[in-house]
Amino acid sequence: MESMEEEASEQQLIRESMDEDAVELLETPIEAVEEKPSEEPYPLPVIQYDVPPYLTYHFFNQFRTPSNPNNFLKGVKWSPDGSGFLTCSDDNTFCLYNLPYDESGQLADFSSSAADTDTYAASLVMSDGESVYDYCWYPYMSSSSPETCVFASTTRDHPIHLWDATTGQLRCTYRAYDAMDEITAAFSIAFNPAGTKIFAGYNKSIRIFDIHRPGRDFTQHSTLQGNKEGQSGIISSMAFCPSHSGLLATGSYSQTTAIHREDNMELLYVLHGQEGGVTHVQFSKDGNYLYTGGRKDPYILCWDIRKTAEIVYKMYRSSETTNQRIYFDIEPRGQHLGSGGQDGSVHIYNLQTGQWVSSFRAASDTVNGFSFHPFLPMAASSSGHRRFGVIDDSHEDMLLTGDENCVSVWSFAYSAFVENDGSPISGGSNGKSELDEDLHLRQEP
């Protein structure tokens, strides 16, 4: 009885410390999220990868300070509504950049800005307490609904944090405890497709939190079965199947990837074949294939989850000598995959054949993050890696250029915008002015 009273008091303190928007989000009935009316899908661009993209926006000064000149980016992710992108850096900082628009409602043109400055400043800067392990957007995030503008993060020795992406304030926390009743940090996190739960990966276990109940309430599932079969090691990455088939993929530093059922966490099968610890997993748009990548592993593997005995094909990327998590992403139409690497280039692959299509130079150091815009012919890349040494004026050869430790937004040429059935609805563009005009049309309601 005493423990229940303490828990109720703890929940009340959390709610008193939150703003009204946070309370509104947490008190939204689960049914309201699960029965969210289906929205009309955005028309999707047919990108022409044989035409090099042009650099639209560029940022690097934001991530360099006199106290930490060796700071570097660790990833970039577009918001689900496409209004902006979120970066994470080694100084435990999140930066949110909203796409800029001029008075006419078109994307702002900063082509005349000085090369030694950032294109524009971050809309929000949020600092976490320790090294960031993972972060993810709420799947139904929409800038027109402030209560949905949140993302979750997990950091070393801290609970899972839910951040407000409109104010930069911490809304609430989700805490897991070990056998010694001490807070234990998750190594990976993901919202389920319904947006009602946060799945978190730990050492040989997965904990599930209800987003409407912040605090220490969770259910726990071991990734190892009674006979010690299953998936061992730290659960380093996870992804849900976008086709709403109820499947969850989890990657482990033990070089394995497991497929679970979301509803009861039943382990369906374990995939072996990655040369390094798995750092990123992602399903194809139709949910039939799974793509996995690992650290110190030069290949992204493609698996047919309907027939898991063999690897379908491998896609090469330059990542043989780094322990960094190097993100890859699949374009909105689901036909191509893009990934960075240590060579400073972004490589594009055809997912029908697994063959290399094209590449472009994105930075002068490791490109560790790449993310396609959810419905526009644009993408964002982040670069940087840890440098062991002191960067100062006496070591001019170690001074960083504007193409290192940077974030860039790229605009692609495209042949048309098409509906999901493939029927064209607008012409394409190879030029900046035409592209900006069509981007403006796509943003209008």
Image (spheres, rainbow, N blue to C red):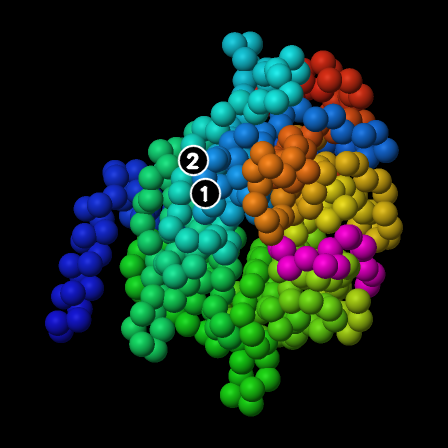
Where residue 16 appears, as percent x and y from the top left, is 19, 46
Residue type pointed to by label 1: Thr
**Number of residues whose C-alpha sits closer than 10 Å to that of mark 1, classed few (under 14), some (14–19) or many (20 or more):** some
Q: Is 102 on the left-hand or right-hand side of 297?
A: left
Across and down, in percent, residue 425 comes to 73, 25
Q: CA distance from mark 1 to mark 2?
A: 7 Å
The rendered magenta stretch, by its main secondary structure, is classed as: loop
Rendered view: 395 above or below 134 = above
Query: What is the residue that sits farthest to the front in this orientation?
Result: 394
**Residue 197, image x, y percentages:** 43, 57
Q: How many marks?
A: 2
- Of mark 1 and mark 2, the one earlier in the sequence is 1
> SS of the residue at dot 2?
strand
Check disc 2 and report the residue beneath it. 125
Which picture quadrant has residue 430?
top right
Magenta residues, start to end: 312-325
